[in-house]
Image (cartoon, rainbow, N blue to C red):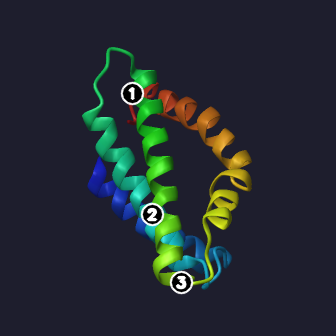
């Protein structure tokens, strides 16, 4: 979809999820909006910038860049704004990589398959 639509989706997806399901809760919503907005922006930008002859390499490079960038923004937002003074590098590492490991693995396994299926169906 590109960086602009990715950014918009990243902003509105957690808001809609919160309104519909109550998750994320109000305390987590602002930092999650920032994190997911960066995911969408970076994924959309990187998929347009990275042009190797291997589409799977392009996809994984874009996905990994977005995942790392989003987690960095999540940590910075928590350290500087949302939990200033009560947030440490250890908390960030645990939340961003240890606790999130199952989600990271699922994203790395499922997202390329979903993109491939959408492309094959000519929907992406």
Secondary structure at numbered mark 1: helix
Dot placed on the residue nearer the N-terminal end, 1 or 3: 1
Reply above or below: 68 against 61: below
Cα separation, mark 3 vs mark 2, equals: 14 Å
* Residue at horizontal 53 percent and vertical 66 percent from the top: 75
Please tell me how crowded label 2 is: few (under 14), some (14-19), or many (20+) other residues with Cα within 10 Å: some
Q: Quadrant of residue 46?
A: top left
Q: Residue furthest top?
A: 53
Residue at the disc numbered 1? 58
The label number, if any, that marks residue 104 in the structure image: none
Name the one closer to the observer, 43 or 78.
78
Cα separation, mark 1 vs mark 3, equals: 36 Å
Please tell me how crowded label 1 is: few (under 14), some (14-19), or many (20+) other residues with Cα within 10 Å: some
Q: Position of residue 7 (x, y in %)?
A: 35, 60
* Residue at horizontal 44 percent and vertical 69 percent from the top: 34
Residue at the disc numbered 3? 84
Reply above or below: 103 against 119: below
Cα separation, mark 1 vs mark 2, equals: 22 Å
Please tell me how crowded label 3 is: few (under 14), some (14-19), or many (20+) other residues with Cα within 10 Å: few
Q: Quadrant of residue 55?
A: top left
Reply above or below: 76 against 123: below
Residue at the disc numbered 2? 73
Name the one closer to the observer, 84 or 37.
84
What is the quadrant of the C terminus in the image?
A: top left
CB contact under 8 Å: marks 1 and 3: no
Describe residue 13's horizontal placement relative to residue 27 as left or right: left
């Amino acid at each position: 979809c590109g960086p602009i639509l990715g950014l918009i989706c990243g902003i509105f997806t957690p808001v809609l999820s919160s309104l519909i399901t109550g998750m994320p809760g109000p305390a987590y919503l602002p930092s999650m909006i920032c994190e997911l907005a960066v995911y969408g922006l970076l994924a959309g930008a990187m998929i347009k910038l990275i042009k190797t002859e291997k589409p799977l390499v392009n996809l994984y490079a874009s996905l990994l860049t977005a995942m790392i960038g989003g987690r960095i923004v999540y940590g910075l937002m928590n350290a500087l704004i949302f939990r200033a003074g009560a947030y440490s590098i250890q908390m960030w590492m645990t939340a961003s990589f240890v606790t999130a490991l199952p989600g990271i693995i699922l994203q790395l396994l499922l997202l390329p398959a979903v993109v491939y299926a959408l492309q094959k169906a000519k929907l992406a």
